[in-house]
Image (tube, helix red, strand yellow):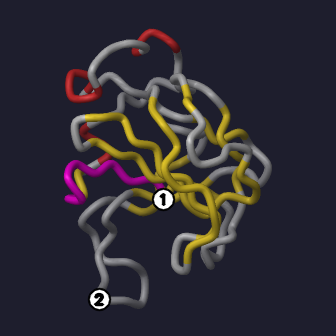
Amino acid sequence: MPDSSVEGKSFGTLKGKLRLPVLGTVTGRFGTKRTDSEVTWEGIFISSKQGNSVKSIAGGAVVYSDWLRGFGNLVIVDHGKGFYTLYGNNESIWVSEGDQLKAGDQLGTVGNSGGHKESGVYFEVRRNSKPLNPMEWVTITN
């Protein structure tokens, strides 16, 4: 799970050092086609048990916290310098717009509010609105 060792560091310097936002298995991979669709993943889908904690991977400010079509219950965190992380498909959201988060702060719980067949978290990393491969930003050492 995310930890405080990344606190206070510029998000851009954390590539390859962050932890996934939830315990689970990556089942949808960045850049691959979604099942029964021509649309490609702009993030990853992490299958996880409903109700598990979803945590912020790094410190930042919550800029969106609500339901959004295609994403379900979605939280967007601004990490500064154009970097954002998106956490979708949540069962519940525990943060509000304007909240300041530290790495590892719980922002919600795993669900399937985004229309996926299984519970889990849809996770994206973006810089200046461009999706980046989240797997390049995390280390799998849960």
Disc 1 packing (10 Å; few <14; some 14–19; many ≥20): many
| 122 up-or-down from 97: above or below | below
Kindly identify the residue that appears in the image at 27 percent across and 21 percent down.
10
| 68 up-or-down from 128: above or below | below
- The part of the chain drawn in magenta is 123-130
Give SS at disc 2: loop
Amino acid marked by disc 1: Phe
Q: Position of residue 116 (x, y in %)?
A: 60, 75
| 69 up-or-down from 142: above or below | below
Q: Which residue is mark 1?
A: 45
Q: How many marks?
A: 2
Taking 91 as reference, is 23 left or right? left
Amino acid marked by disc 2: Glu
- Front position in the image: 104 or 30: 104
- Front position in the image: 32 or 99: 99
Q: Position of residue 71 (x, y in %)?
A: 53, 70
Q: Position of residue 55 (x, y in %)?
A: 60, 35
Give SS at disc 1: strand
Q: Which residue is mark 2?
A: 38
Going from N to C along the chain, the mark reached first, 2 or 1, is: 2
